[in-house]
Amino acid sequence: MNSGKSPLPDNNKMINLKSHDYYEITGAQIRAARALIRWSAKELALAAGVGVATISRAEVEAGRTTLTAANLKAIRLALETAGIEFLPQNGGGVGVRFRNPT
């Protein structure tokens, strides 16, 4: 783990799987986010509580993924917890960046 942050999930956090407040992230955004924090697919899978095959399946898709909403939200939460911010389509295309620390 090169980021210095443990990818192990915090069992005290609950994911609201029925929330519709997140736009869907793309496979390319997942690949880019993982590269920014220098996590392996295995580290992201551990942090999100999903299988490595799920991460691989998501990342090969250029656009919207075919993952379940629960898996996609778990992956997004893990990456956001690690300091990633997902950028929506805003005329320049979707993207990722490090979140500005507060």
Image: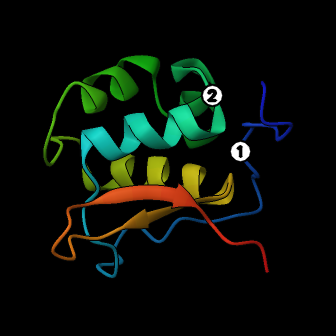
Answer above or below: position of 90 versus 35: below
Mark 1: which secondary structure?
Answer: loop
At label 2, which amino acid type do we have?
Trp
For the point 48% across and 33% down, which residue is it? 50
Task: Locate the N terminus and report the quarter of the image it occupies.
Answer: top right
Q: Is residue 7 left or right of residue 99?
A: right
Q: Which residue is labeled 1 in the image?
A: 9
Which of pointers 1 and 2 lies earlier in the amino acid sequence? 1
For the point 63% across and 26% down, which residue is it? 43
Q: Please tell me in which quadrant of the rendered image residue 87 appears.
A: bottom left
The 10 Å Cα crowd at callout 2, few under 14, some 14 to 19, many 20 or more, is: many
Answer above or below: position of 12 versus 34: below
Q: Please tell me in which quadrant of the rendered image residue 12 appears.
A: bottom right
Task: Name the foreground residue: 93 vs 47.
Answer: 93
Q: Which residue is labeled 2 in the image?
A: 39
For the point 24% across and 48% down, which residue is it? 26
The outermost residue toward the right is: 4
At label 1, which amino acid type do we have?
Pro
Answer above or below: position of 89 versus 9: below
Task: Locate the C terminus and report the quarter of the image it occupies.
Answer: bottom right
Q: Is residue 41 left or right of residue 88?
A: right
What's the CA distance linking mark 1 and mark 2?
A: 14 Å
Residue 11 location in percent, x, y? 75, 52
